[in-house]
Image (cartoon, grey):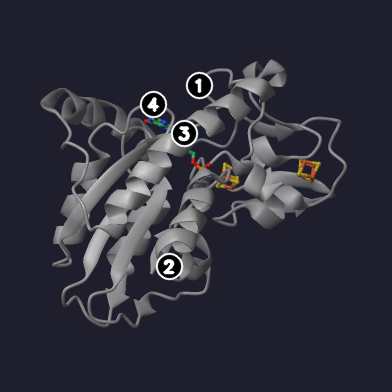
Amino acid sequence: MIFYFSGTGNSFYVAKRIKKQIGGEVIDMAEAMGEGEYRYEIEEGEHIGFVFPVYYYGLPTIVREFIEKLELSSYDAVHIYAVVTCGANYGAADRMLKGLLAEKDMHLSAFYGFPTVDNFIFGYDLQNKEEQEQTLKNAEGRLMTIIKSLSLKGKSDKPSTLLERVLTKAVYPIYEKGRNTRNFYADNRCISCNLCEEICPSKAIEMVDGKPKWIKDQCIHCVACINRCPVEAIQYGQSTKKRNRYVHPILK
Ligand SMILES: Cc1cc2nc3c(=O)[nH]c(=O)nc-3n(C[C@H](O)[C@H](O)[C@H](O)COP(=O)(O)O)c2cc1C
Ligand code: SF4
Ligand code: SF4
């Protein structure tokens, strides 16, 4: 079974590739949460995977909440692994996940970081289309290595260093506390297509008079809306007006 969460498609792509190579049902954690579905039947010896993006060197809040509520029918001899997609560095997300699973008597057997296209449009400009394509191509080798290791129930990446742990401790609280939505708006290019509302994984967009309105308490800053708007009408403050957008080809 492969539990995944994805805003712009990188993690969805990884989950689908793992399914293709080594099998397992693919379950969208956001969708499962929306349906209140937390209990799953597990066969002995089954692989249990978690695939999701790293946010601020830690876990997206939606992934944490899902795992906290998750109930598996059996933990006997299951092999639990995680593949975390990122732009460059996952900090101490491995420790955060390990700790969370340990609270449920689940043992994380393997953890892999998978650097690919960075979608963090709030912070800086993204790669242009050609660079994004090249990054996706270059990342394939690493993905094959991860999948091969998984199929052999292989070893994790090296555990996070002290410096990476310090980094997570310093940066992650910004995400936990500061997920503002007041900077979001749709400019006059908006064609009222409703896509942003439909794709938001945490139901944080409501359409009012044909325009999106953001609900602060629900937004997890996954950047799906801003990157996937078909006419690039969604902005976050002034700086995103000239920035590139990114969506993995699997979602196009
Ligand atoms: C809120 C947010 C925070 C992020 N923080 C990090 C980070 O700490 N380190 C990193 O390498 N990439 C970071 N990224 C980039 C994503 O982890 C990366 O692009 C990921 O593959 C996106 O996955 P998705 O397409 O499945 O949503 C961040 C992205 C977002 C939206
Ligand atoms: S996805 Fe873009 S164009 Fe469509 S409703 Fe949302 S802001 Fe408007
Ligand atoms: S409103 Fe927030 S949670 Fe919803 S798609 Fe946009 S960034 Fe993601």
Amino acid carrying label 4: it is: Ala
Q: Which mark is residue 139?
A: 3
The residue under label 1 is 123
Q: Is ligand 1 less than 8 Å from the beta carbon at label 1?
A: yes
Q: Mark 1 and mark 3: span between their CA atoms?
A: 22 Å
Under circle 1, the secondary element is loop
User: Earlier along the polypeptide chain: callout 1 or callout 3?
Assistant: 1
Q: Is ligand 1 less than 8 Å from the beta carbon at label 4?
A: yes
Residue at 47% of width from left, 67% of height from top?
27
Q: Mark 2 and mark 3: span between their CA atoms?
A: 21 Å
For label 2, the crowd category at 10 Å Cα-Cα, with few meaning under 14, some 14 to 19 and many 20 or more, is some
For label 4, the crowd category at 10 Å Cα-Cα, with few meaning under 14, some 14 to 19 and many 20 or more, is some
Q: Mark 1 and mark 2: span between their CA atoms?
A: 36 Å
Front one among 88 and 7: 88
Foreground: disc 1 or disc 4: 4
Under circle 2, the secondary element is loop
How many numbered discs sit on the rendered protein?
A: 4
User: Earlier along the polypeptide chain: callout 2 or callout 3?
Assistant: 2
- The answer to whether marks 3 and 4 mark residues whose Cβ atoms lie closer than 8 Å is no
Residue at 38% of width from left, 74% of height from top?
38
Front one among 144 and 246: 144
Residue at 36% of width from left, 51% of height from top?
147
The residue under label 4 is 88
Amino acid carrying label 1: it is: Gly
Q: Is residue 221 above or below residue 79?
A: above
Front one among 140 and 129: 140
Under circle 4, the secondary element is loop
User: Earlier along the polypeptide chain: callout 3 or callout 4?
Assistant: 4
Question: Is residue 35 at least partly visible in the picture?
Answer: yes
- The answer to whether marks 2 and 3 mark residues whose Cβ atoms lie closer than 8 Å is no
Q: Mark 1 and mark 4: span between their CA atoms?
A: 14 Å
Q: Which mark is residue 23?
A: 2
